[in-house]
Amino acid sequence: MSKADEIFIQNMTDILDHGFSDEAYPVRPHWEDGTPAHTRKLFGVVNRYNLQEELPILTIRRTAFKSCLDELLWIWQKKSNNIHDLKSHIWDSWADENGSIGKAYGYQLAKKSIYPEGEFDQVDRVLFDLKNNPHSRRIMTNIYNFEDLHEMRLYPCAYSMTFNVTGDTLNGILNQRSNDMLTANNWNVLQYALLLHMFAQVSGLKVGTLLHVIADAHIYDRHEELVRKVIAKTPHKAPKLWINPEIKDFYDFTVEDFKLEGYEFETLEEKIPVAI
């Protein structure tokens, strides 16, 4: 069993057995038929992944590795807020007629600020500090910009990263206000594990630990039976991650510079309903 499977199964079991149901309360999300999308939730879930041991990707269901990576590069490398720059269709329902998701995600990372060393956007500042001041305790990003929320098609869910170097090892904390555990939990974990791998490689550091802090970890009401089926499946060993060792600049990475070796996974035949 991979560590990601173990953590995921424990989280899901805890939510199903001990989670709070908001069925008696008004909620914003709804299903396509207009029915309110209620959840069962836990507050304050914290998970730790040792990236030196394995890549945290589920095997009890498939996580779409290339689409996951493509979205990460869309946000952090292209710093885009337009779905025409994205190969998958996961953001289609949130985009306007021009393909924009508003002043969200990549848009926020691209905004520049003035520092004593010059002008940087959020990504370039992290990369600068990891190379020039790696033991700083100020290496972080935040895309939950209150002044721009009214122009975002969706408020950021995974909204901040704190990067911390211990010796020669890069660690990170991903803060997430809300996590749809069935559809997005491992997607987010895998993305930010890969981001740490990339930042470590181009900064001459070793990759270390990803800490994932979730304020509201929830399972939607129409997902509960699917969750029970997923966590009952037989886990496999985690696959091996290969990253092109020739890449020394973060902006040179492409999806083709990453490969999974020995990724075995269980399938989920049912279509997962999406709350909007």
Image (tube, grey):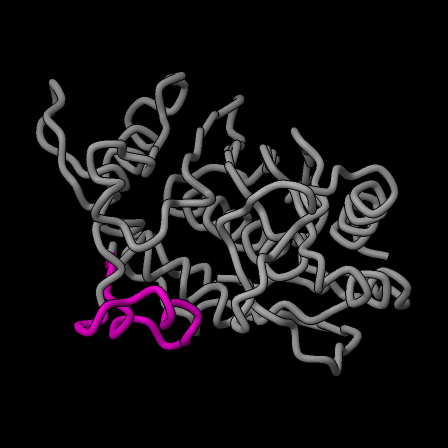
Q: Is residue 119 magenta?
A: no
- Front residue (pair 231, 242): 231
Our reading of the magenta stretch's main secondary structure is loop
Percent coordinates x, y for residue 163 in the rendering: 44, 30
- Position of 234 compared to 140: left or right? right
Between 104 and 264, which is closer to the camera in this rendering?
A: 104
- Asked whether residue 52 appears in the rendered view, the answer is no
Q: State the residue in front, 137 or 32.
A: 32
In the image, residue 18 above or below residue 105:
above
**Picture quadrant where residue 123 is located:** top left
Kindly tell me whether residue 63 is visible in this rendering: yes
Q: Position of residue 258 (x, y in %)?
A: 50, 67
Q: Is residue 122 above or below residue 224?
A: above
Judge left or right: residue 144 versus residue 147.
right
> Residue at left 70%, top 41%?
41
Tell me what residue is drawn at x 27 percent, y 32 percent: 146
Above or below, comparing residue 143 to residue 265 in the picture: above
Q: Position of residue 17 (x, y in %)?
A: 88, 43
Read off the magenta span.
80-99
Q: Is residue 238 left or right of residue 1?
A: left
Most extreme residue toward the bottom, as rendered?
Answer: 269
Residue at 43% x, 74% y is 256
Residue 83: within the magenta? yes
- Quadrant position of the N terminus in the picture: bottom right
Based on the displayed image, in which of its 4 quarters is residue 162 positioned? top left
Task: Please give the name of the residue rendered at 46% of the width and 64% of the height, measured from the top-left corner.
Answer: 69
Judged left or right of residue 239, residue 129 is left
State the image quarter where residue 143 is shown.
Answer: top left
